[in-house]
Image (cartoon, rainbow, N blue to C red):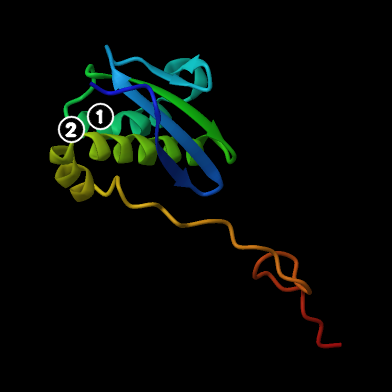
Amino acid sequence: MIENLEVRTGKRKTAVARVYLRNGSGKIIVNGKDLDTYFPGELFKIIVMKPLEVTNNLVNYDIKINVTGGGYSGQAGACQHGIARALAYYDLSNRASLKANGFLTRDSRMVERKKYGRRGARRRFQFSKR
C-alpha cells in the first residue's frame, strides 16, 4: 500500500515538481486544480500522462503535484519527470520501460545567462568599421 508522502521531485528548465503518489482511480491534481484545467493545451497533458501510459498505470494511482517556476512547457516536463521517478521508486518493474523511453533522464537544458558587454547570452553589439 502506498502512503500519501512526498515521493519524488521532477525538474526541467527552472520548474520543480513535487509528486505525491497513492493508490486510487487515476485522478491527477496539479496545484489544486484538475490536470485539464491547469494546463491549457492538449500537448502538455499528453506530456504529463506519458509515463503512466508506458507503464499501463493510467487508473491505478491518484497523483497530486505541486509545481513551481518556469512556464507551461517546463512545468509539464517537470511533472513528467517526477511521475516517472515515483513510478520507478514504488515498482522496480516499471524502471526498464521508463528508462528506455527516456523519462528518468533529467532534461538539463536551461536558458544561458546574459554576459556583460553583450546584448544577450551571445549576441554582440553591431560592429562599426568607421
Q: Quadrant of residue 114?
A: bottom right
Q: Residue at x 41, y 53 (%)?
A: 107
Q: Residue 8, how many percent across, how many down?
A: 39, 38
Q: Residue 80, how many percent across, how many down?
A: 37, 37
Q: Is residue 26 above or below residue 105?
A: above
Left or right placement of residue 130 versus residue 58 in this view:
right
Residue marked by disc 2: 55
Quadrant into which the N terminus falls = top left
Residue marked by disc 1: 52
Q: Residue at x 56, y 47 (%)?
A: 14
Given contact means CB atoms under 8 Å apart, are the residues at marks 2 and 1 in contact? yes
Say which of 31 and 73 sits in front: 31
Farthest residue, direction top: 25
Q: Quadrant of residue 130?
A: bottom right
Q: Quadrant of residue 121?
A: bottom right
Q: Residue at x 31, y 36 (%)?
A: 86
Q: Residue 2, how many percent across, how many down?
A: 27, 23
Q: Residue at x 34, y 34 (%)?
A: 83
Farthest residue, direction left: 93
Say which of 26 and 9 sits in front: 9
> What residue type is disc 1 on?
Leu
> What residue type is disc 2 on?
Thr
| SS for dot 2 | loop
